[in-house]
Image (cartoon, rainbow, N blue to C red):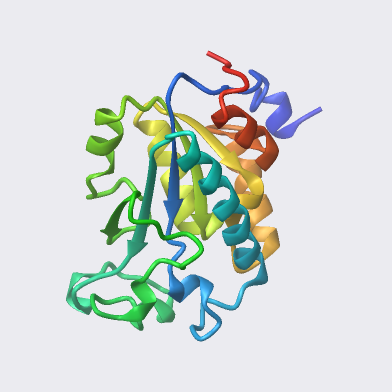
Amino acid sequence: MNGFSAAGYGDKGNIGFGRQPAVLVVDFQRSFTDSAYPMGRSGHVDQAVENTARLLKVARANEVPVATCSVGWNSPRDMAYWKVSSVYKDMFYGDAGMELDPRIADPSDFHFVKGAPSIFFGTPLQTFLTRQGVDTVIVTGCTTSGCVRASIVDAFSYGYRVMVPETCCGDQEIGAHQANLADVGRRYADILDLEEVIQAISGKHKDA
C-alpha cells in the first residue's frame, strides 16, 4: 500500500459539527450563474445553485447565520494577476455580473464584496463570524477548484470546523470539482451529502 492512505491522510475520521454553524456562499453571482456570461454556462454550477438555495431556506428558518459574497473590483488597477480573461469583464462595481443570483440573494444575509479568491481574505467575514459565535462553517459556492478551495483552506487555517456539502459546490469541469474536494477532504474538511447538512442545521443532531 502506498500513496495518501499509507501516509495517514484522512484516517482520523470526520471532524463533525460544533455548536454554532454558519453557511458561507462563495461567488454565486450572475457572472458565474447566468448563461449570458462566459463563465456562467456550467450546468454543474447551476445545479449547485439550486441545491444551495434549498440549504439556505433551511438555514434561515433555523436562524443559522448566512454570509454571501461576490467577487469584483473598482477597476483593473485593483486586481491581482489573474490568468482568466473573463474576470476582466463584468466584474467591476456597477456591472450586473456582480449581482448575486436571485435564487441565492436575501436581504437578511450578511453580504460583501471580495477581491481575492478566499471569502476571508481582506473581508469583514471573520468579525461577523466571531460576533455570531460561529465554530463551524458550511462552505458552498463556485468554483470548487478556485475560490471555494481557497475559502476552505482559510477557514481551516482560522480554526473552524469545515463542512462542505458536495452538491452545493460547482465548477467548470466535474473532474476539477471531484479532485479538489477529494484533496481537501483528506486534509481540512468533511465532504458531506446535502441531506446530512440539512439534518445538522435543523437541530436533529450535534456532534460536539
Quarter of the image with the N terminus in it: top right
Q: Position of residue 52 (x, y in %)?
A: 56, 52
Relative to 139, residue 145 above or below: below
Q: Is residue 132 left or right of residue 2?
A: left
Taking the spot 24% from the left edge, 71% from the top edge, the residue there is 73
In the rendering, at what x and y percent does residue 138 appear? 50, 38
The residue lying toward the viewer, choosing from 196 and 154, is 196
Position of residue 124 relative to residue 136, above or below, is below
Q: Is residue 164 left or right of residue 31?
A: right
Q: For this rendering, which residue is in front, 16 or 76? A: 16
Identify the residue at horizontal 32%, vertical 24% (top origin).
Answer: 133
Total numbered labels:
0
Quadrant assignment, res 190: top right
Residue 91: give x, y in percent of width and height: 33, 76
Seen at 36% across and 27% down, the residue is: 134
What residue is shown at x 55% (from left), y 33% (from top)? 189
Question: From the viewer's perspective, is residue 40 above or below residue 169?
Answer: below
The furthest residue to the top? 208
> Residue 172: where, in percent of width, then height?
60, 69
Q: Is residue 64 above or below residue 144?
A: above
Direction front: furthest residue: 61
**Can residue 193 be seen?**
no
Question: Is residue 127 visible to the viewer in this orientation of the structure?
Answer: yes
Horizontally, residue 41 falls left or right of residue 84, namely: right
